[in-house]
Amino acid sequence: MNKTIAVFGGSFNPPGVHHRRIAEELSRHFDEVYVVPHGPRPDKIMVNDVDSIYRATMTDLTFRGLKGVQVDLFDLEQATFTRTHLLQERFAERGDVWHVVGTDLIESGKNQQSFVHQAWEDGRRLWEEYRFAVVTRGGSGLDPADLPPLHKLIRLNSEGSSAIIREKLFHREPISGLVTAEVAKYIERYGLYRGRIPNKVTNFALQDPQVLIVADERNPKAVDWSSRLAGYRGSENPNLVLVIGGDGTMLHAIQKYWGLRIPFFGINAGHLGFLMNDAQEILEGTFPPQDLVLRQMPLLYVESLDKDGEWKTALSFNDAWVERASSQTAWIEVKIDGEVRLPKLVGDGVLVSTAAGSTAYARSMGAMPLPSETPALLLVGSNVMSPPNWKSAFLSLDSHVEFRGMNPEKRPLNGYAGGFWQGEVQTMRIRLSRIAAAELAFSRSHDMAEKIAQIQFPRT
């Protein structure tokens, strides 16, 4: 017997408690439930008012912890709107697919005048052939004659509306009970739905720390400090990732745990520690400090075409690059937003870095580190022979970068995303992720700009 799969698509802008209740009820009737927030839609321009990175985070927070419920962020990452027949194809191999609709979408179905008939692509055929999980909502009537031929009725008396939530937020009215507590805090942190540009840097205080500790086990200081702070270890639902070590430890922690959608707080047991806080201040004071600054930093989305013609994807907080995989110099074509900017870069390799990652490998390749708030990506070459005198360039945050190996048989390239080997690659494409970000918490005394200044103006 095939698994039953419920596909619950929607704007979720923002996702509310009513959405969570629907998913929870669906999980009682189906083996698996997939929540699919869609990307830009011409008929729902409101979804473009809040960046996808915020919608992705709120969706993860809303449906977290529901057994049998998974969030699929494909549309948000690709900035697409997958039509129902394509969702059918996407999930068909997993089992029998049931598409979740509200009673408002099937009204007048008996007259073939429902929203499904009129607005969905190939809606008349879908109505007859597809399976529908029809969810009743509080206060909405249902004419049994309107039900699709293949349906399962899910009776639920929960009411709610994302439009009402947005309106209340715009007018600075309370939304308690309309969204989960985690989503309410997230909206407040970044000032979402207020009719202004959301915050990138915000104040943060954690009243009841329940931490997940990630420590560099090869560093004796990190191991010792981890033991001293073990009393703050949380339960199954931590609200902070405590990272003890150097920047490398932080990078590995972000790579592994960004999907938890909770802040990262680092204690420096290494050297400069651009992403870390001062150990003495933390260990001798109150943990965690109550007056923190929180910075939301997006990850890079990396696509690599391997030598066998297969595409693979990865995420990286710091950087992504290609480098020569043989004794031959690399010949690399560099495209920016589809336009060839460097027809033939000759050297050891070329890298794209976020501002936060500019203190790492990009710096060792000769680039000057950028403050983390700099709205730019950094493009830098390694031991570039041609073009003459070219070293690096600044790119806008929304840039799409592509590296293509020229003559890969003779001059193969290795690809890396955040230090993780992607294998031998023919092409690599890099942009900011639309769904993945890490929130880094810093004490007020942490000064990344001063650490960067120490690099630029070394003391003799």
Image (cartoon, helix red, strand yellow):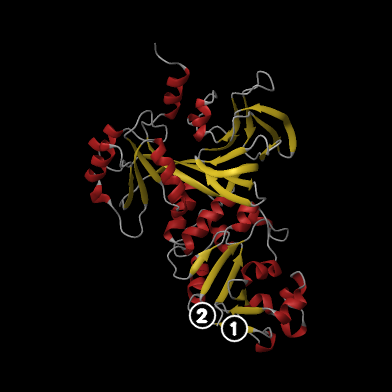
Res. 108 visible in picture = no
User: At 28% across and 52% down in the image, what residue appears?
Assistant: 233
User: At 22% across and 43% down in the image, what residue appears?
Assistant: 228
Pointer 2 residue: 29
| Secondary structure category for the residue under label 1 | strand
User: At 54% across and 23% down in the image, what residue appears?
Assistant: 366
Q: Amino acid at mark 1?
A: Lys
Q: Amino acid at mark 2?
A: His
Mark 1: give few (<14), some (14-19) or many (20+) Cα within 10 Å.
some
Q: Give the position of the C terminus as an image quadrant.
A: top left
386 over 162 or under it: above or below: above
> In this image, 410 relative to 159: left or right?
right
386 over 402 or under it: above or below: above
Q: List the single residue furthest toward the bottom.
A: 145
Q: Give the position of the N terminus as an image quadrant.
A: bottom right
Q: Which of 177/432 is in front?
A: 432
Label number found at residue 152: 1
Residue 218 screen position, x and y as percent: 31, 39
Residue 349 screen position, x and y as percent: 60, 31
